[in-house]
Amino acid sequence: MSTIYDKANVEGVLSAHASASAQLVTTPCRLRGVHAVPGATAGTLQFRNGGASGTILLTIDTVASATSAAVYIALPGAGINFGTDLYCTVTNTAFVTALYAQ
């Protein structure tokens, strides 16, 4: 059984970072994990395929606490396939880092 720490799961993984809504990846990719730092109020991260108005493939709610620990979510298997690009709508979240493979 493979774990997130296996060489095969980490090789070729790239990252993109944002503190506001942004196009994180401009080509097709697989989202493998998300690291987020909460803001002072409850927030939301929406990961979209197809730009700012694209289809939402993943939504993550963040807690309301600027002093709370960061959140890391490892997506199982090969992750979520974004067939066009990867856009993240960031609401009331200090920072987000997407871990992805192409």
Image (cartoon, grey):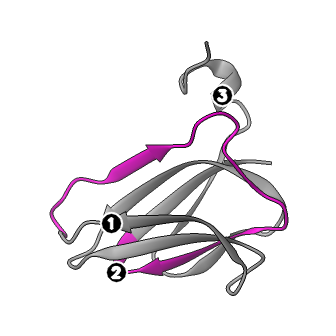
| Chain-order first, disc 1 or disc 2 | 1
Residue on which the image places disc 1: 62
Q: Residues within 10 Å of mark 3 (few under 14, many from 20)?
A: some
Q: Residues within 10 Å of mark 1 (few under 14, many from 20)?
A: many
Question: What type is the residue that disc 2 sits on?
Answer: Asn
70 vs 20, left or right, is left
Query: In this figure, which residue is indicated by the disc labeled 3?
Result: 9
Give residue 44's quadrant in the image: bottom left
- Which residue occupies 32% across, 66% down? 62
Number of dots carrying numbers:
3
Magenta region: which residues? Answer: 66-94
> Which residue is at 18% across, 59% downward?
68
Decide which of tag 1 and tag 3 comes sooner along the chain: 3
Real-space Cα distance between discs 1 and 2? 8 Å
Q: CA distance from mark 1 to mark 3?
A: 26 Å
Q: Is residue 67 magenta?
A: yes
Disc 2: which residue: 92
Task: Say which quarter of the image contains residue 13.
Answer: top right
Tag 3: amino acid: Asn
Question: Along the horizontal axis of the image, is 61 left or right of 63?
Answer: right
Residue 9's spot in the image, x, y percent?
Answer: 66, 28
